Amino acid sequence: MTEPVVTLRHFFEQAREGQLTAIRCGNCGALATPPREFCPSCAQRRWEPVALSGEGTIASYTIIRVAPRAHAGDVPYAIAAVQMKEGVSMLGRVLDIPLDRVKVGLAVRFRPLVRDGQTAVAFGPA
């Protein structure tokens, strides 16, 4: 296939249904998060969708104490870079884990966060 098969819209539609999707280069096998025009490893455009397990570990995180106006009522909350079991990283909100327990290496599981008709990537206890 010569075009990206997982658009940003498709990614979030799948996430709303509880499924995280990555893309794998059909040329070199590199795994990436969508959307991507070209493979960062070989510069080809041969993407294939790959379902992710949703399991991962926190690689890095930050506690948001001053949020944009739309999220001001949610502070404080954590945002984490999560290394997925399959090797790609995803950025998402941490839910249902006390902030003092959020740490690098903590096992988490994907769960969709749907508010006001919008879907976001979030992670909760594994």
Image (cartoon, grey):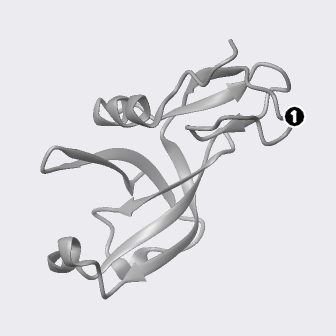
Residue 30 quadrant? top right
- Residue beneath label 1, please? 42
Q: Count numbered badges in the picture.
A: 1
- The outermost residue toward the bottom is 66
- The outermost residue toward the top is 1
Residue 63 quadrant? bottom left
In the image, residue 58 above or below residue 24: below
Q: Mark 1: few, some, or many residues within 10 Å (few <14, many ≥20)?
A: few
In the image, residue 74 above or below residue 124: below
Q: 37 or 123: nearer the eye?
A: 37
The quadrant of the image that shows the N terminus is top right
Q: 93 or 125: nearer the eye?
A: 93
> Where residue 36 sits: x, y (%)?
63, 38
In the image, residue 87 above or below residue 23: below
Q: Left or right? Give the position of 104 relative to 123.
A: right
Seen at 40% across and 28% down, the residue is 10
Q: What secondary structure is marked by label 1?
A: loop
Q: Left or right? Give the position of 94 relative to 6.
A: left
Q: What residue type is labelled 1?
A: Cys
